Amino acid sequence: MKLLFLHGAPAAGKLTVAKALLRIVPGRLMDNHAAIDLALTVFDFGAPGFWELVHDVRRSAIDAAAEHRVPLLVTTFCYAEPDDREQFRQIEEIVQRRGGELLPVFLHCSREEALSRVGNPDRVARRKITSGEHLILELDRYDLTAVPRPDCLRLDTGMNPAEVTAQAIVRRFGLNA
């Protein structure tokens, strides 16, 4: 299994790029919010037990995909350093143990670009951050940076359409259909 780990700040274009990529190459999508939405059926956001369940669901899904040889799993993640380092280490360990390959991609854009995206109707429908004020608080509160891997591909989603960014990922990792 190849795990394409798309990470970056809220409104960096992770889900948009993931969908564009999966129109080019076959694979499965595990959006960051799938685990969050499941946890919200049990807990209020951020309540004790909430994040533990989110992390358990993500790890279980990645492990199941690797066990059952899903060829390509694309996942989105808001990685914050150092807060999420242990979560990333555990994901990396699952992929290695199962003989898979982790393909890290850090997507970023300017604050102005992210703020222009935050009111997107798709973000509202998916219960993502939709307030510019909330987005700025998150950007200032967390170090939303690339994972600590030298092979991490870094792409500015404000410079190109999602389809061009997806093509760059396909070329870099040899994901041709």
Image: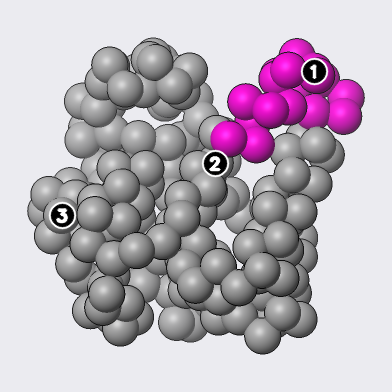
Q: Amino acid at mark 2?
A: Asn
Q: Which SS class for mark 3?
A: helix
The reply to whether residue 5 is visible in this rendering is no
What span is colored magenta in the figure?
34-50
Label 3: which residue?
Answer: 163
Q: Residue at x 79, y 28 (%)?
A: 50
Q: Which SS class for mark 1?
A: loop
Label 2, label 1: how many angstroms apart (C-alpha)?
17 Å
Q: Is residue 44 magenta?
A: yes
User: Is residue 148 shown above or below 164?
Assistant: below
> Which residue is situated farthest in the front direction here?
68
Q: Earlier in the sequence, mark 3 or mark 1?
A: 1
Disc marking residue 32? 2
The one of 48 and 103 positioned closer to us in this rendering: 103
User: Is residue 134 shown above or below 3?
Assistant: above
Q: Residue at x 76, y 81 (%)?
A: 97
Q: Earlier in the sequence, mark 2 or mark 1?
A: 2
Q: Which SS class for mark 2?
A: helix
- Figure quadrant of the N terminus: bottom right
Q: Amino acid at mark 3?
A: Glu
Label 1: which residue?
Answer: 43
Q: Earlier in the sequence, mark 3 or mark 2?
A: 2
148 left or right, relative to 122: right
Label 3, label 2: how many angstroms apart (C-alpha)?
20 Å
Would you say the residues marked 3 and 1 are in contact, meaning their CB atoms lie under 8 Å apart?
no
Residue 113, quarter of the rendered image: top left
**Circle 2 residues within 10 Å: few <14, some 14–19, many ≥20:** some
User: Is residue 174 shown above or below 177?
Assistant: below
User: Is residue 131 shown above or below 13?
Assistant: above
**Circle 3 residues within 10 Å: few <14, some 14–19, many ≥20:** some
The reply to whether residue 48 is visible in this rendering is yes
Q: Residue at x 36, y 22 (%)?
A: 123
